[in-house]
Amino acid sequence: MTNIVLVGESYGEEEERTRIPFSGSAGYELTKMLGEAGIHRADTYITNVFNLRPKGNKIETLCGTKSQAIPGYPALGKGLYIRAEFARELERLSNELIEVNPNLVVALGNTALWALTGRTTISKFRGTTTLSTHCATGFKCLPTYHPAAILRQWDLRPISVIDLVKAKRESAFPEIRRPFREVWIEPTLEDIYEFHKRYIEGCRILSVDIETAGRGITCIGFAPSPRRAIVIPFFDPKKLGKNYWPTHELERSVWNYIANTCSNPQLPKLFQNGLYDITFLYRGYGIRVANAREDTMLLHYSLQPESLKGLGFLGSVYTEEGSWKEMRARGKKTIKRDD
């Protein structure tokens, strides 16, 4: 049984001659990266979205206008729609996936991501598992960079190897597994005190994260363990005045709680880019953070100083979470302050 299918974009010069996907220089690099990730190329099934060579090796030559597009498929790029005459290639890919029936499909590059999920911009979705929604729906997919892109931009290589290491883990089972999380939202003051008593008191380390807009904090989160957290909001667009707390007295009590928790020297704290949060809390609210012991961004930097350091990237590398920033609704919000 083949647990992993690798899907590339199209044939290059060597692939066109041999009719074997990834038989050229990009294929050689793919074999090396698979080996570093503990995957034997012979144990995988390798194919392309398009088993043909586009003119000039440019996928744009397969594109046309929206009226020429394959029904049900979005644009591959701005104003670039794969022409309906190439729908047979997607049907062939779908049949291959159904026949092989792998636990995991690795989408190598933007075109494979588009064919399987209808999404584009590989940098946003690489490293996290999702389901195929367009070509052979229901397969677990993990996108990463195409080896040809790595040959052009070498700093992408360690990221792709990390993704392939995750692919090996994910290939052991066909379903998407997300970790359990218990998150308390929209709490009352009593909820905050109860959460603190149950979970924060005596915890080994407390993760702290603030969200800001302009000069104000919109919410602050406390997580005493990887599976449990509370989010304390201050901004609520649904309420009159946009303030979550109905009275100044209640909000003052909440800020007193936050100040006492953050300044408690007996409670170790963990941040992501903590210098920003700690400085914002002190300059904006006069809250001094004590015993800030760990910072995930700095810890990651010590391991991989050449790679990205944002929380979304760290989540894709070290967790089984989805691409959470792409799950939320987008829109501009203006927060007015009465000071």
Image: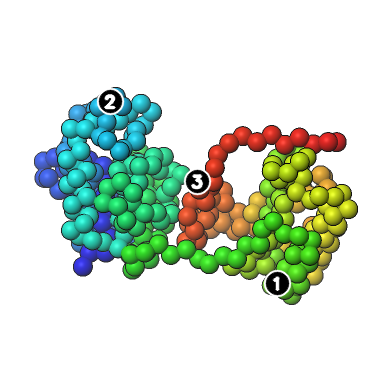
As measured in the structure, the alpha-carbon distance from the residue carrying label 2 to the one carrying label 3 is 28 Å
Q: What residue type is labelled 1?
A: Tyr
Between discs 2 and 1, the one toward the N terminus: 2
The residue under label 1 is 199
Nearer the observer: mark 2 or 1; the answer is 2
Q: Is residue 46 above or below residue 50?
A: below
The residue under label 2 is 67
Q: How far from the left and from the top, in percent, is residue 30?
A: 28, 52
State whether residue 170 appears in this view.
Answer: yes
Q: How far from the left and from the top, in percent, is residue 176?
A: 40, 62
- Name the side, left or right, on which 82 lies relative to 280: left
**Which labelled disc corresponds to residue 326?**
3
Q: Do tag 2 and tag 1 residues touch (Cβ < 8 Å)?
A: no
For disc 1, the neighbor class at 10 Å (few under 14, some 14 to 19, many from 20) is some
State whether residue 58 appears in this view.
Answer: no
For disc 3, the neighbor class at 10 Å (few under 14, some 14 to 19, many from 20) is few
Q: Which amino acid does label 2 sit on?
A: Ser
For mark 2, give the secondary structure: helix
Q: Do tag 3 and tag 1 residues touch (Cβ < 8 Å)?
A: no
As measured in the structure, the alpha-carbon distance from the residue carrying label 3 to the one carrying label 1 is 30 Å
**Front position in the image: 85 or 122:** 85
Q: Which amino acid does label 3 sit on?
A: Glu
Q: In this view, does 213 lie above or below 207?
A: above
